[in-house]
Image (spheres, helix red, strand yellow):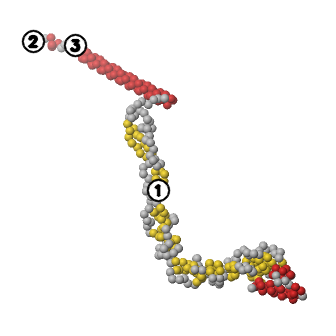
Amino acid sequence: MQLQLISFVLIILHCMDYTGCQQHSSSRHRQHKQIPGVSSGCQQGGCLTCSDYNGCLSCKPRFFMHLERIGMKQIGVCMTSCPPGFYGTRSPERNTCTKCRSECDSCFNKNFCTRCRAGFYLHLGKCQESCPEGLVRSDTQRECVPKCPAECESCVNGETCMQCRPGLYQLSGRCHHVCPDDYEPNDKLMECTPQVHCEVGEWSEWSPCSRSGRTCGFKRGQETRTRQVLQYPSPFGQPCPEISEIKECLVKRRKCPELGERGTERRERRNRNNRKDKENQEGRRERKRERERERDTGEREDSDNRNKTEHRHRRGHDTEPVSPDDGLVQ
């Protein structure tokens, strides 16, 4: 109606200024062409006809006419979709943007709101100041939402929780103090997550019987086998079993072959040790003989000294003087 009124006013002004008003055609497109300031070569892509003062007067097919207020005047704008707070209506004559109800921020049509203004709450396409029984107001969503169970912080409905209260773990829309069997608490996500148990592969073949890294030169040794971990467990999952085993083994003792440089080194080292042992034995025997010679020499010297002492004693008795009285005969 507003655009029709603008067009009508322009036509009246044209008739007042020009005497050829009776020759004005009934076609809207021809009317605009005959009015000064009205053009069909508009710069805005959606305009079919426009005015320098009032902007778009008509739009191309499938475009919506929207009136924007700038100060005291309104400017026509052609848009592919209506702005927030308006909804589009189509008719054979023109497509227009119509303002939503006062309590709606956005709407689908005059009877169905999609978002409400602050202080109103959406329920079944209507914006209401209070919610029906069983529903509560959500200021963040501006909607009437189901009343959550006591353990829920937010919920989809009375049975499905989206977020639990602090200290509780969410699982399949429910909140738990303790997670059910086969689940474990995730303190980072505050959810019950499935437990993961350890998985291991098949045992390998037993290794050759060995001892200290050698496979010869012994009779009793050990054999080992291992298996790989395919899946490590979660914190509360079943732990991994042993992944290695050792058992005792017996082999027919055989001498290790000495081959190559390593065998030559072993042989030379053994020869050096043998020579040292032989030298040590000879040295010990020589020192023993030396001690025996010293002992024999000492014994001979002691024997000679005793003999000399006895000889001197005997000589002393033989040369002792005779007393004169011993020769008198009574």
Vertical relation: 317 (above or below) 38: above
Q: Amino acid at mark 3?
A: Asp
Q: Amino acid at mark 1?
A: Pro
Vertical relation: 86 (above or below) 228: below
Distance from disc 2 to disc 1, alpha carbons, whole Å, reads 135 Å
Q: Quadrant of residue 208?
A: top left
Q: Which residue is mark 1?
A: 233
The extreme right residue here reads 19
Looking at this view, is 15 or 158 the one in front? Answer: 15
Q: Which mark is residue 330?
A: 2
Q: Position of residue 239 (x, y in %)?
A: 43, 55
Q: What residue is rendered at 42% in x and 26% in y?
A: 274
Numbered circles on residues, count: 3
* Nearest-to-viewer mark from 2 and 3: 3
Looking at this view, is 74 or 308 the one in front? Answer: 74
Q: Earlier in the sequence, mark 2 or mark 3?
A: 3
Q: Quadrant of the N terminus?
A: bottom right
Mark 3: secondary structure = helix
The extreme left residue here reads 330
Q: Which mark is residue 318?
A: 3
Mark 1: secondary structure = loop
Residue 105 visible in rendering: no
Q: What residue is rendered at 38% in x and 22% in y?
A: 286
Q: Earlier in the sequence, mark 3 or mark 1?
A: 1
Looking at this view, is 153 or 284 the one in front? Answer: 153
Query: In the displayed structure, does residue 314 sit left or right of residue 183?
Result: left
Distance from disc 3 to disc 1, alpha carbons, whole Å, reads 115 Å
Query: In the displayed structure, does residue 303 sit left or right of residue 55?
Result: left
Q: Amino acid at mark 2?
A: Gln
Q: Earlier in the sequence, mark 2 or mark 1?
A: 1
Cβ atoms at labels 3 and 1 below 8 Å apart: no
